[in-house]
Image (spheres, rainbow, N blue to C red):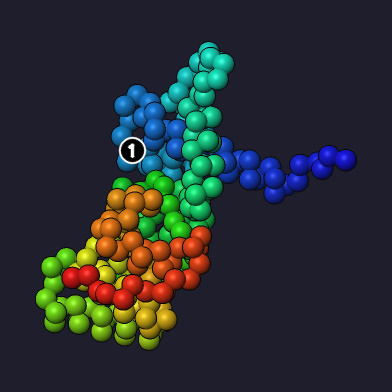
Amino acid sequence: MQRSPSYSDAMDMVRLEERAALVALLQVRPQSVRWGEITAGVVEAGSALEVWHRLVPPTLPSLPGELDPMGAAVQDIETWAAQGHTMLTVLDGAYPARLRGVHQAPPVLFTRGSVLPQDRAVSVVGSRKASERGLEIAANIAGELVARDVTVVVGLALGIDTAAHRAALEAGGRTVAIIGTGINKAYPAANRELAACCSPSSGPMPLPRSTPS
């Protein structure tokens, strides 16, 4: 017997449609609207679908075998999920509240691992070509943050980023890596293993033995 759609099924469908509408808006850029304006409009309306219908007039059905922008967006979202990525939009409750308040907040975040909206976190930043003393200071700071149950937020570059990540992970702490090159691309390649340490698809991994500098 076929199961009747439940309330949660309906809500999942609504959420998928909203996410697809946001992705389609960002991909199509109707009326040459900038992504920052799209984000602001979606937040103000509380609905990406509403903005999509306002900016994109109804068109004739797509040709057989050709996806319309919304269909293509759904396909992309399903591909990202299959790759193990969690997608958060600026309308999702799990989207970091403090980031949402930033001017031109990113409309979409892709994450791997655990997302903790109320996480206490401190960023550690510094030079890619740091001195040995600088690397030591970064590692000490990261270790002290972990000791106080604070998440360490860092990029994945060489130098200070690497030192802070390694120290926090070796101390059994939680880190968040901000990746500016796309979540599927490990850059620099020397930090591929470091990036994989927090990957839920690969399971726990030992830290690489050498520290890039």
Label 1: few (<14), some (14–19) or many (≥20) C-alpha neighbours in 10 Å: some
* Residue 184 located left or right of residue 68: left
* Residue 102 located left or right of residue 201: left
In which image quadrant can residue 33 be found?
top left
Of the pair 38 and 155, the residue shown nearer to us: 155
Viewer can see residue 91: no
Q: Position of residue 164 (x, y in %)?
A: 28, 75
Q: Is residue 116 above or below residue 28?
A: below
Task: Determine the residue positioned at 43% across, 26% down.
Answer: 55
Give the tally of numbered discs.
Answer: 1
* Residue 37 located left or right of residue 71: left
Q: Image quadrant for the C terminus? A: bottom left
Disc 1 element:
helix
- Determine which residue is flagged by label 1: 35
Of the pair 190 and 146, the residue shown nearer to us: 190
Q: Position of residue 86 (x, y in %)?
A: 49, 53
Q: Position of residue 135 (x, y in %)?
A: 19, 77
Task: Determine the residue positioned at 33% across, 61% down.
Answer: 192
Of the pair 141 and 156, the residue shown nearer to us: 156
Q: Is residue 100 above or below residue 43?
A: below
Task: Determine the residue positioned at 38% across, 50% down.
Answer: 184
Q: Position of residue 113 (x, y in %)?
A: 48, 63
Task: Determine the residue positioned at 39% across, 33% down.
Answer: 27
* Residue 150 located left or right of residue 54: left
